[in-house]
Amino acid sequence: MDADGLLTRLGGFFAARDDNYVWVVGGAVRDAIRGREIHDIDLVVRGDAEPIGRAVADFLGGTPVVVDAWNITRVALPPEVDGGRPFIIDINGHHGSLEDNLGARDFTVDAMAFPLRCWDTDERFDSIVDPLDGKGDLVRGVLRATSDEVFQEDPGRMLRGVRLASRLGFRMEPNTARAIRRDAHLLDRVSAERVRDEFMAILEANGARVQLEGLDRLDLLCRVIPELEATRDCDQPRAHHYWDVWGHLLHCVEYAEEVTAGHRNNAIYTMAPWTANEDAHFAEMVGDGHNRRTVLKLAALLHDIAKPQTKGPDQNGRIRFLGHSEQGAEMVQSRLPALRMARRTTDLVSTMVLHHLRPSQLRERDSMPSARAIYRYYRDVGDAAVDTLYLAMADFLAARGPELSPERWNNYARMIATVLEAGATPPAREEGPRALVNGHDLMDTLKLPPGPRIGALLDRLREAQAVGEISSREEALSLAARLLEDNASEV
């Protein structure tokens, strides 16, 4: 069922109740005027929302959730197909005039309404109530606040404004932008969950770098992630040709978008490896309702977050950032839980930050990585291995900026493709073929006591099996004996 069918059914439901005071308001009106697909439906009814909302939920087979503070009952309808987007119906009860209800909304383009009974008639657009000229702002492509106090009344609207302007492709009206900058300090009144959802929605959309820069101009970005402030004007060595750490992080978000765009973008970025496997991988939902592509962009924004704290000269006087990956991973483990990120999201970003330099260290000079190096990479990075390869490509591009050498980028992308291809086969994964020997075999055959040496030997044997050095029990035991005889440091 699409939005047209749903609104028609709702119209029949309220008509059967002989209730004609039901208005479609907000985004559904805006999107109907623009001829865009409608996903969420807001209705204004007279009186208390809860009993009406529960009756609607029973009628449509949805689940009602009561929000007492706003006199709203939200009805969630399950998607009709797996992976589909569920419809959300917000039923807002009020006792004043419709104009008062519209005037209390955040932006003029969402402060319009028409009677539900007119939805499937020719009178639909002629019956629109538009006290604040929302239609005019739609035509002009302007996002304008309904009043000077809307952000003081609800500071969460500031982030929503940036997200909505991006989604609509609108410019923010200057007085609205000034009001956000004036009230930006009020963002700490907003729940962490709401800040998280709005911020991640901004990251999710294409063109996220531009939106992050917009958040910064409105004094919001570093209120969401305060640790970013120290990266501003933090210079880098010549290897990072164009930007300080701040600029590098923002452009890394842009390049993370480019290398996961599935070859639908500028030809230079189509060198990034992309198959149906990667397409499915980055579409996977990992936590908080966000997919791996969005989480990758978050990691791109944070991967060098600890560079200011670790900046200093090495023994040769060169500026280095020793330990920034490890310290950055710790900062992620502190900041993301404060934003109420899911544990899996936090761990995935933290692992990417910790290992973001690892892909570039897999090869020696211009040679391709060895089977052993690839095995160890997948063993150590685990669930974040593919994501970290794409973060490394974005980092490579953001380090060079406009001075990118197509030849060097092509060589780097080929190296990443080699690691991805090897990782697509079981031997490179930790869940590779069944072990040739176990701890009891080693203890019985080599007369070894229990202890950590057994575990170290098994790790070496598993690695040798994965890279094709051994393929039988006898070869495994023989290699174990040689390792003991050579007194290898690993065992």
Image (cartoon, rainbow, N blue to C red):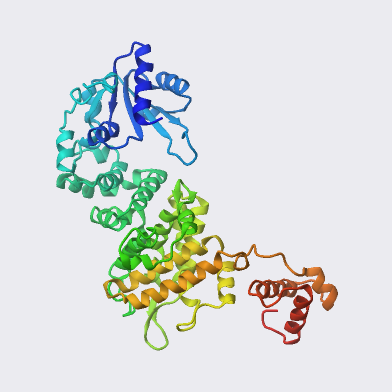
Work out whether residue 181 can be spotted.
yes
Q: In which quarter of the image is residue 412?
A: bottom left
In the image, 96 versus 490, the foreground residue is 490
Residue 467 point in image, percent of width and height:
63, 74
Residue at the bottom extreme?
A: 316
Q: Which is nearer the eye, 430 or 368?
A: 368
* Point 77% across, 80% down: residue: 478
Q: Which residue is drawn at 29% across and 18% down?
A: 117
In the image, is 350 to the left or to the right of 409? right
Q: Which of 376 and 161 is in front in this view?
A: 376
The x and y percentages for residue 368 are 50, 78
Q: Measured along the vertical axis of the image, is residue 300 above or below residue 444?
A: above
Relative vertical location of residue 80 with respect to residue 342 in this rendering, above or below: above
Q: Quadrant of residue 87?
A: top left
Question: Is residue 240 visible from the viewing direction of this image?
Answer: no
In the rendered image, which quarter contains the C terminus? Answer: bottom right
Residue drawn at 77 percent across, 68 percent down:
438
Q: How many numbered discs, if any?
A: 0
User: Where is residue 317 shown, x and y percent of the image?
Assistant: 37, 87
In the image, 175 versus 183, the foreground residue is 175
Residue 347's place in the image compared with 120, above or below, is below
- In x, y percent, where is residue 239? 34, 79
- Residue 308 location, quadrant: bottom left
- For the point 35% across and 78% down, the residue is 407
Quadrant showing the N terminus: top left
